[in-house]
Image: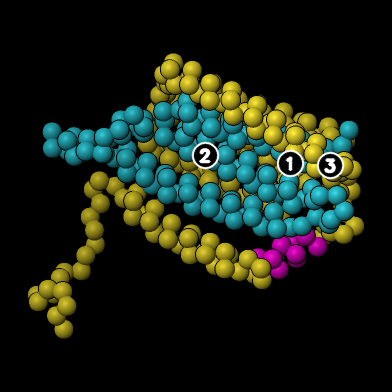
Amino acid sequence: MTIGLTHVLVLSCVLAVGGILTILLKRNAIGILVGVELILNAAALNFVAAGRFPPAGRPPVLDGDVAAMFLIFIAAAEAAVALAVFLSFYNNHSSVDVESGSLLKESQANATD
Amino acid sequence: MTALAFYFLAGVTLASVGCVVFCKSIVRVCMGLLGALLAVAGLFLLMNAELLAAIQILIYAGGTLILIIFGVMLSRDSPMHRIPSHKSDFRWAIIICGIILPALILSVVMLGKSSESPPTVAPGLIAPSPALPSEQDNRTIGKLLVVDYLVAFELAGVLLLVVMIGAAYLARGPNFKSIKTPAPAGGRGSP
């Protein structure tokens, strides 16, 4: 049995749903970021597989690789900004529990107390 | 052989995703992410995308994951500290994913069945495709980057610069003192 596009797509479905589950379950902000990274990785896998397994009768193309490369760049940028926001949040709330950030005003209330 | 390698990598990916989803300790979650990233890099290798596998390991596993672990270390008194999730969160998550996952897999399988009149055999997985020799891949990707996708490439560079400045500004500590040059006596705009 040969491995085709469908096998890779099913695997990336599982990866993406694992990411969604992580985002829904974790209350730690860094855990949520990890879930986002899983989803982005599933997208990169889809891009590469779509380029490398062309429809019958066509040569494979490398545009999917380039798209996946851009996706990795953007994921790195997103992680950097998200972690900077988390550090700023931690400085205000002494926690990265997302439920402690339900009110934006809370940090000012804490500062005045 | 490639099928065996694929199923092995798929198993590693699934185990890592399970670790990410169900582990409570944030450090174990990060290690699970590392396993998933390395397994996906192995899948890239299996699809003959060597350059992308190297980029995945260097930037993702070597850069982004280290950044996340630094975030864990900087934002915790004890790295093993746990934030438990609610039971109601768990129930809703299971319901939502129980709908999404079968729908996604069903659509993918139906798409595969409808589109492959001859089975879509991977040229890359069986042997390097004659139309696309593996050693020419990198050259082709380089040409694509600076010819077809030049604007996106430049925009990615600008994005990374902006992100670097913005992240450094956002992550400044509470005791950060901004370095300001003393304002001239006449205020802004005076000659």
Residue A80 locus on image (x, y percent): 45, 49
Which tint was used for chain A? cyan
User: Alpha-carbon neighbours of circle 3 within 10 Å: few (<14), some, or many (≥20)?
Assistant: few
Amino acid identity at mark 1: Leu
Read off the chain for label 3: B
Magenta span: predominant SS is helix
Quarter assignment of residue A7: top right
Q: Gap between marks 1 and 3, in whole Å?
A: 22 Å
Q: Secondary structure at mark 3?
A: loop
Q: Is residue B34 left or right of residue A32?
A: right
Q: Which residues are magenta?
A: B136-145
**Residue to which mark 2 is pinned:** A36
Q: Is residue A28 left or right of residue B66?
A: left
Residue B120 visible in the current orientation: yes
Instruction: Indicate the quadrant containing the C terminus of chain B: top left, top right, bottom left or bottom right.
Output: bottom left
Residue B86 locus on image (x, y percent): 41, 19
**Residue to which mark 1 is pinned:** B43
Quarter assignment of residue B76: top left
Amino acid identity at mark 2: Val
Q: Image point 75% across, 65% down: which residue?
A: B139
Q: Nearer the viewer, mark 1 or mark 3?
A: 3
Amino acid identity at mark 3: Glu
Q: Gap between marks 2 and 1, in whole Å?
A: 20 Å
